[in-house]
Amino acid sequence: MFRESSTVQRLIPVEIIAGILFGVFTGFIALEYIIMAFTILMLFAFETMNSAVEEVNDLVTLEENERVKRSKDIASGSVWLWHLVYIVEVIFFLICHLVHFTWWTHVIPG
């Protein structure tokens, strides 16, 4: 998966580096980095499942098949969703820090 997927080789490292840089320059707290790390782990998990679905489908048939195409689309859609979750959460953390809104005090009791 790591050698074959251009998403894993190009997009995910850019997302990680951008998230870390935004965090360093705006002062993300440890909880935000933990949330970002969890999301990246989920992204890798879904990328792995997507690769597995594609490999199994290609093993079953190389012919055009609507059901195979649909299953590949669903698997890649789940990966896209986790990319979106990561981007939205980094932007949310960034905006919260820029406007000095401590969201964690509203979520974590105490």
Image: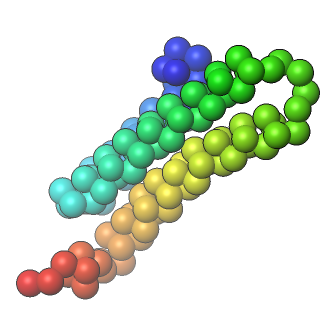
Identified at 25% across, 84% down, the residue is 106
Identified at 26% across, 53% down, the residue is 33
Residue 88 placement (x, y as % from top left): 50, 62
Q: Is residue 51 left or right of residue 66?
A: left
Residue 63 placement (x, y as % from top left): 89, 21
Q: From what the image shows, is residue 13 above or below residue 91? A: above
Residue 96 placement (x, y as % from top left): 36, 73
Q: Nearer the viewer, residue 4 or 52?
A: 52
Q: From what the image shows, is residue 48 above or below residue 80? A: above
For the C terminus, give its image quadrant.
bottom left
Q: From what the image shows, is residue 16 above or below residue 52? A: below
Identified at 43% across, 62% down, the residue is 89
**Count of numbered circles on the image:** 0
Q: Is residue 78 left or right of residue 33?
A: right
Q: Nearer the viewer, residue 103 or 75?
A: 75
Residue that extends furthest to the front in the rendered view of this protein: 60
Q: Nearer the viewer, residue 39 or 49?
A: 49
Which colour style is shown?
rainbow
On the question of residue 23 being in view, the answer is: no
On the question of residue 66 being in view, the answer is: yes
Q: Nearer the viewer, residue 87 or 99?
A: 87
Q: From what the image shows, is residue 45 above or below residue 35? A: above
Identified at 29% across, 78% down, the residue is 103
Residue that extends furthest to the left in the rendered view of this protein: 110
Q: Is residue 57 left or right of residue 64?
A: left
Residue 98 placement (x, y as % from top left): 36, 71
Q: Is residue 92 left or right of residue 30?
A: right
